[in-house]
Image (cartoon, rainbow, N blue to C red):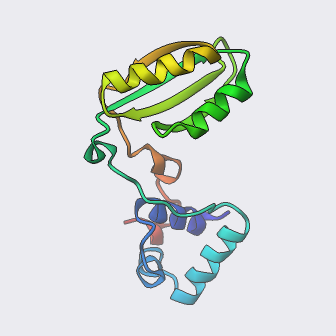
Amino acid sequence: MDVIDQKILYELQLNARLSMKELAKKIYLSSPATTERVRKLEEQGIIKGYKTVVDVEKLEKNITAFVLFQTTKCKELSKFCEEHQDVMECYRVTGQISYIAKVCTASVHTLEDFIDEAMKFGTPSTNIVLSSNDTMDTKLFQQEFSSPILKE
């Protein structure tokens, strides 16, 4: 992967709805060359897909929490999290904690309901998010690009 591919990934993470023409202008390539590079990144599985980022607070899910579990019932907890409407992400991790679930829910009462339902799978510990920096997704390619042509 060269610096142009890195710039493509950076720009698409900022705005995946860019047209190939707009993206081409940003990386100083022709539209056909840009389209070909994006296609290759998709074929290689580097670009796995495109998604919509939803503001969960506007859906009245005002509480975001990370619920950490000590458990030996990993498969059962994973299935429970996958099926629960308030679980946005779930990770199996190493260390004292076996699972971390990111929960976005309407209130502390619905968070408590989730915790109560999940207790049969292990011991939970909850951390409520006070604020976040959601620009971290683009950090991987947010570097000084070595080619002066690609600097903005």
For the point 56% across and 14% down, which residue is it?
119
Viewer-proximal residue among 101 and 19: 101
Within the image, what quadrant is residue 90 found in?
top right
Question: Which of the 4 image quarters holds residue 37?
Answer: bottom right
Residue 114 position within the rendered picture, expressed as x and y whole percent measured from the top left: 46, 24
Q: Is residue 55 left or right of residue 123?
A: left
Image quarter where the N terminus lies is bottom right
- Find residue 73 and report its horizontal and vertical position in percent: 72, 19
What residue is at 66 percent from the left and 34 percent from the top?
Answer: 79
- Could you say where residue 36 lies in the image, as x and y percent from the top left? 63, 82
Q: Residue at x 72, y 70 (%)?
A: 43
Residue 87 location, x and y as percent? 50, 36
101 lies left or right of 40: left
From the viewer's perspective, is residue 28 above or below residue 60? below
**32 versus 88 height, above or below:** below
How many marks the image carries: the answer is: 0
Task: Give residue 70's quadrant in the image.
Answer: top right
Closer to the camera in the image, 139 or 107: 107
Quadrant where the C terminus is found in the figure: bottom left
